[in-house]
């Protein structure tokens, strides 16, 4: 017999990927590289050096129709999804670079 109670009694802990030893009001910065073309909107968030990607979301990942990839609604949804993913990494502030 398989024991089902051991799996259901354990709670799933949410993973935290950011820096561990931070003071209370210390800011952790990231850089949001936003590129809006006629066909899609890209939100790519990196660390300050730009070498490590913290989050990458596009408008096409948020909507189902191809014609809506470059819409303002898809860009707004991409920004909100990027913010949620960014909070998991421990980033508390961002610089924004538009292209």
Image (cartoon, rainbow, N blue to C red):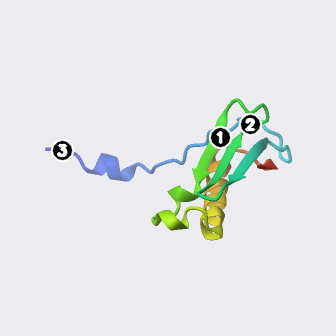
Q: Is mark 3 on a helix, strand or loop?
A: loop
Q: Position of residue 77 (x, y in %)?
A: 61, 64
Nearer mark to the viewer, of 1 and 3: 1
**Left or right: 19 with respect to 85?**
right
| Residue plotted at (79% across, 35% down) | 48
Q: Position of residue 52 (x, y in %)?
A: 67, 32
Q: What element carries label 2?
A: loop
Q: Earlier in the sequence, mark 3 or mark 2?
A: 3
Residue 39 occupies quadrant:
bottom right
Q: Which residue carries the number 1 mark?
A: 54
Foreground pick, 33 / 53: 33
Q: Is residue 76 above or below residue 14?
A: below
| Residue plotted at (65% across, 40% down) | 54
Q: Which of marks 1 and 3 is nearer the N terminus?
A: 3
Q: Where is residue 22 in the image (x, y as percent from the top left)?
A: 79, 38
Q: How far apart are marks 1 and 3 (CA)?
A: 40 Å
Res. 2 mark: 3
Instruction: Pick out the residue farthest to the right.
Output: 25
Foreground pick, 90 / 49: 49
Q: Which of marks 1 and 2 is nearer the N terminus?
A: 2
Res. 47 mark: 2
Q: Is mark 1 on a helix, strand or loop?
A: strand
Q: Are discs 1 and 2 less than 8 Å apart at CB?
A: yes
Q: How far apart are marks 1 and 2 (CA)?
A: 7 Å
Q: Are discs 1 and 3 less than 8 Å apart at CB?
A: no
| Residue plotted at (55% across, 62% down) | 69
Q: How far apart are marks 3 and 2 (CA)?
A: 45 Å
Q: In this view, does 50 lie above or below 29?
A: above
């Amino acid at each position: 017999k398989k024991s089902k109670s051991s799996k259901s009694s354990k709670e799933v802990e949410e993973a935290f990927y950011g820096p561990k030893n931070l003071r209370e009001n210390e800011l952790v910065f990231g850089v949001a590289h936003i590129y809006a073309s006629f066909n899609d909107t890209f939100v790519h968030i990196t660390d300050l050096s730009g070498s490590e990607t913290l989050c990458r979301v596009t408008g096409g990942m948020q909507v189902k129709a191809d014609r809506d990839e470059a819409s303002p609604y898809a860009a707004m949804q991409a920004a909100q999804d990027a913010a949620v993913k960014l909070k998991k990494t421990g980033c508390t502030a961002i610089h924004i670079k538009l292209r």
